[in-house]
Image: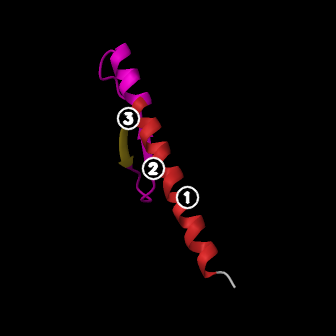
Amino acid sequence: MSVNRNQSGELFYSPINVGEIEREDLSLWQEAERVLQQIIESERQQQTRQSKGISL
């Protein structure tokens, strides 16, 4: 994916061909997504705990 700006400053994306995708690539991306989802969920839980502590 290529990211550029148009004349009005908005971002736009263009697909680019970088070669073949191997099965190992998909496994790596799935693992990275799993880890990121865990981080996001952990952050959500922490924010929920913090917001409950301040409510009166």
Residue 24 visible in the current orientation? yes
As drawn, 8 above or below 12: below
Question: Mark 3 against mark 2, which lies toward the viewer?
Answer: 2
Quick one: label 3 or label 2, which is nearer the N terminus?
3
| Circle 2 residue | 39
Whether residue 48 sits left or right of residue 2 in the image: it is: right
Where is residue 45 drawn, in percent x and y?
56, 59
Quick one: label 2 or label 1, which is nearer the N terminus?
2
Pointer 3 and pointer 1: residues touching (CB < 8 Å)? no
Residue sitting at x 45%, y 55%: 10
Q: Residues within 10 Å of mark 1 (few under 14, many from 20)?
A: few
Question: Mark 3 against mark 1, which lies toward the viewer?
Answer: 1
Residue sitting at x 53%, y 51%: 41
The type of residue carrying mark 2 is Ile
Quick one: label 3 or label 1, which is nearer the N terminus?
3
> Could you say whether the residue bearing mark 1 is in a helix, strand or loop?
helix
Residue sitting at x 34%, y 23%: 17
Label 3 to label 1: alpha-carbon separation: 29 Å
The residue segment tinted magenta is 5-30
| Circle 3 residue | 1
Where is residue 55 drawn, in percent x and y?
66, 81
Where is residue 37 drawn, in percent x and y?
49, 43
> Which image quadrant is residue 3 in?
top left
Whether residue 51 sits left or right of residue 15 in the image: it is: right
- Counting labels gives 3
- Taking depth in this image into account, of 21 and 28 the one nearest to the observer is 28
As drawn, 44 above or below 17: below
The disc label shown at residue 44, or none: 1
> Which image quadrant is residue 48 in?
bottom right
